[in-house]
Image (cartoon, helix red, strand yellow):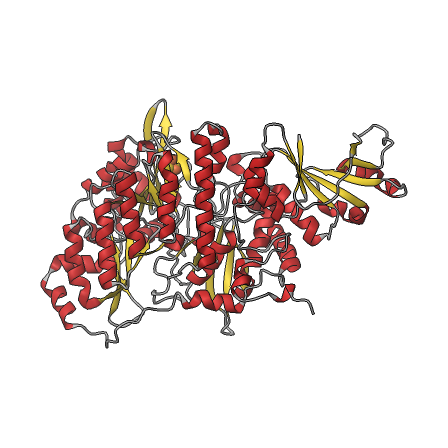
């Protein structure tokens, strides 16, 4: 993991002091809320429906056990004893008091964390594959580059007042777990035929009101030019992105309006000018950062593990959990564990202080003190020995963390919705809870297989409904909360946007409709075919017929 | 309104010449982008010191041919959230090699001064109600910078590994 040196430390501490001063000025009334707003928004502090919300950055979703314990402590001391892990691999506290926020930031700084650029029209916390560095299908580890981007973008003097927020995601793997085609910039490390590694650069993807799958604007970018290329993209966007309409201000609209070719031409022209300047990646600095992401000293094994095999054969509940929540690891005899934050009936992404501490302890004992946050709002133990899996599972079970549903229908992404968000049309969290209760049957869920449900409480799409295999969008009609059903989206390497099926539903109605969709799929699927592929093979028609006229296909 | 000088550049008194009105009898005159486009060639023949008032949408490519004749460029920030002026400033300095005074005017928050300084501004026109002391304090908040900009500061990545080549005198 990356560790701060004295420069990183100083900068974060200076940020804390700056914010302390700004809060003090607000509390004495020297700053009005209107004047304070842009300042707090530079630091992840929002005013929500009922209270302030503080969003803390978890750079590229990586946490140490100590950092996790600090997050738990903060939730206990300054909040209501829990935190909410977000789709951008961050954590949110929903109830801090304004006067406490500088102290919270000071405590975060003690463990090399901050809330810089977790809100505002700036380059936001960069996200990456939560399996980075351990995935088997990885060409190169994206984390050192993510850290370079973090540093370059922190307090960037030119790009702190962009037309709109700006999100960058990276991956180094074939399978896209970071939704790079739905970000303002997506970067994918690839090996070219001649063996050289470079970035495929995607720009202008995004969700929100106008979802777009980003086009590739450069097939191969030498890694040493990463920052100059990003700077060129940002400079074109900062000057020409629309500022007349908030809803048209994201880079996707600029790319769309200019056309990919013209946008790319402008970026390349700017890049040609700055390409070999001071942003060129210094070899020594890259190696310094890369060394901190070296693999931990895994115990050498031949990969076979009789104890693990025995538990697997002897305990079907454990086997079910392994089947869904344990993933192939690069090192023999090791595995990656997904800790589900989606217990049936719980709030997707929430973790109590105690749960955070348990995870921190487990990571310390079994995963070289490292934890990841996934954009699907689960936690990951990236370096687990297979022989430890059974013990880990037992511990997780006793703290409500052992749900065997990673990637299944109840592994739902839901935005905060009407319970917290002032923009919401409808509730998201209670709906997610009710769906999970309706499908609260492990065997049935496993039979249904991979199925991603994503729920947004309004058109802003924080719950990523556009890329749900089943997407749900909260709308308001004549003062009533309604839910629209969408099918066929994907945020992965085969990205596609979900399409609306037809008229909306009440809360109970939408759950019935989901059940109908699932039954239609089960009746129609071919051997080994998951929901998305059945949908793509058949198209929307049979599903629509089943939902709206009660016919089920054979 | 207060003029806050960041780099100690000598400013002197500038007189604005609104579009359509005759160029005043003064040594240093500020004109609009539009006027520069229309009358720039003629004005270059005079002994005037020319200043240019830029709006965020003005194309710098059009200004390029006058760069060496300008001694002041004022970049307007219509609202503090409009960040185009930062890119204009850096491009004027780094792409077009502008050496004269660069001034920011309009809606400026104290905490933005530091960013402006880094993008190559020499001076800020502070609106009534913006306290110059608060701005000066805000300029002092940070000891280090991560990224290169128009101010040429040594960046953190550079400091970590000794003096960078670009700053070595041969
Ligand atoms: S999608 Fe809408 S309701 Fe949900 S969090 Fe975003 S803005 Fe709020």
Name the spot of residue A194 as percent of width and height, x first.
Answer: 52, 74
Q: Residue at x 23, y 51 (%)?
A: A357
The residue drawn where x is 78% and y is 35% is B13
Indicate the quadrant where residue A102 lies. Answer: top left
A287 horizontally vs A449: left or right: right
- Would residue A500 be visible to someone looking at this image? no
Q: Residue at x 76, y 38 (%)?
A: B33
Residue A104 higher or lower than A284, as above or below? above
Residue furthest out toward the left: A314
Tell me where residue A10 appears, x and y as whole percent: 46, 53
| Residue nearest the observer in this picture, A24 or A545 | A24
> In the image, A27: left or right of A443?
right
**For this view, does A326 lie left or right of residue B28?**
left
Tell me the quadrant of the picture where the N terminus of chain A can be found: bottom left
- List x then y, in percent, for residue A440: 17, 44
Q: Is residue A154 visible?
A: yes
Res. A48 image quadrant: top left
Report which quarter residue A499 is drawn in. Answer: top left
């Amino acid at each position: 993991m990356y560790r701060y040196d004295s420069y990183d430390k100083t900068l974060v501490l200076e940020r804390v002091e700056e914010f302390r001063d700004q809060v003090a000025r607000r509390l004495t009334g020297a700053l009005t809320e209107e004047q304070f707003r842009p300042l707090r928004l530079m630091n992840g502090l929002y005013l929500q429906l009922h209270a302030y919300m503080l969003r803390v950055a978890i750079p590229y979703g990586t946490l140490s056990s100590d950092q996790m314990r600090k997050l738990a402590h903060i939730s206990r001391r300054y909040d209501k004893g829990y935190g909410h892990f977000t789709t951008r691999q961050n954590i949110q506290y929903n109830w801090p008091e304004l006067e406490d926020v500088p102290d919270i930031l000071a405590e975060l700084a003690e463990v090399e964390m901050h809330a810089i650029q977790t809100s505002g029209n700036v380059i936001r916390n960069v996200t990456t594959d939560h399996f980075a560095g351990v995935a088997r299908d990885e060409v190169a580890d994206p984390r050192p580059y993510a850290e370079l981007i973090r540093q370059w973008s922190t307090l960037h003097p030119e790009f702190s007042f962009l037309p709109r927020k700006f999100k960058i995601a990276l991956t180094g793997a074939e399978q896209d777990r970071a939704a790079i085609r739905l970000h303002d910039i997506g970067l994918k490390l690839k090996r070219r035929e001649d063996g050289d590694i470079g970035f495929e650069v995607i720009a202008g993807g995004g969700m929100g009101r106008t979802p777009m799958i980003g086009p590739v604007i450069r097939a191969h970018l030498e890694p040493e030019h990463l920052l100059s290329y990003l700077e060129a993209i940002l400079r074109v966007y900062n000057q020409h992105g629309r500022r007349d309409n908030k809803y048209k201000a994201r880079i996707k609209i600029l790319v769309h309006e200019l056309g990919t070719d013209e946008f790319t031409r402008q970026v390349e022209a700017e890049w040609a000018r700055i390409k070999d300047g001071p942003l060129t990646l210094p070899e020594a600095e890259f190696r310094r950062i890369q060394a901190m992401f070296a693999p931990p000293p895994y115990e050498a094994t031949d990969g076979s593990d009789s104890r693990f095999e025995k538990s697997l054969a002897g305990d079907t509940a454990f086997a079910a959990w392994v089947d869904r929540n344990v993933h192939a690891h690069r090192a023999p005899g090791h595995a990656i564990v997904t800790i589900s934050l989606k217990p049936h009936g719980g709030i997707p992404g929430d973790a109590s202080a105690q749960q955070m501490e348990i995870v921190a302890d487990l990571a310390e004992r079994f995963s070289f003190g490292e934890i990841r946050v996934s954009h699907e709002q689960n936690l990951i133990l990236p370096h687990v020995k297979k022989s430890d899996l059974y013990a880990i599972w037992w511990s997780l079970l006793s703290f409500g963390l052992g749900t065997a549903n990673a990637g299944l229908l109840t592994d739902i992404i839901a935005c905060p919705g009407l319970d917290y968000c002032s923009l919401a049309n409808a509730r998201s969290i209670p709906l997610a809870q009710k769906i999970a209760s309706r499908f609260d049957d492990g065997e049935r869920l496993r039979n249904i297989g991979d199925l991603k449900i994503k729920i947004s409480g309004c058109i802003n799409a924080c719950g990523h409904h556009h890329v749900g295999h089943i997407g749900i969008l909260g709308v308001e009609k004549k003062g009533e909360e309604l839910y629209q059903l969408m099918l066929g989206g994907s945020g992965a390497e085969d990205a596609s946007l979900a399409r609306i099926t037809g008229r909306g539903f009440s809360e109970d109605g939408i759950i019935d409709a989901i059940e109908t969709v699932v039954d239609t799929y089960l009746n129609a699927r071919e051997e080994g075919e998951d929901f998305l592929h059945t949908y793509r093979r058949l198209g929307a028609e049979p599903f629509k017929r089943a939902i709206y006229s009660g016919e089920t296909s054979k | 309104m207060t003029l806050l000088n960041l780099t100690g550049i000598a400013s002197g008194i500038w007189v604005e010449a609104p579009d359509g009105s005759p160029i005043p009898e003064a040594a240093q005159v500020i004109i609009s982008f539009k006027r520069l486009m229309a009358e720039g060639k003629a004005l270059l023949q005079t002994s005037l010191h020319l200043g240019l008032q830029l709006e965020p949408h003005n194309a710098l490519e059009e200004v390029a041919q006058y760069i060496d004749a300008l001694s002041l460029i004022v970049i307007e920030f219509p609202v503090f959230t409009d960040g185009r002026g930062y890119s204009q400033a850096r491009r004027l300095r780094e792409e077009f090699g502008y050496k004269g005074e660069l001034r920011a005017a309009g809606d400026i928050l104290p905490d933005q001064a530091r960013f402006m300084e880094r993008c190559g501004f020499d001076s800020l026109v502070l609106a009534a109600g913006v306290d110059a002391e608060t701005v000066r304090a805000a300029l002092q908040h940070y000891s280090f910078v991560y990224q290169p900009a128009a101010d040429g500061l040594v960046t953190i990545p550079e400091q970590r590994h000794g003096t960078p080549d670009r700053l070595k005198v041969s």
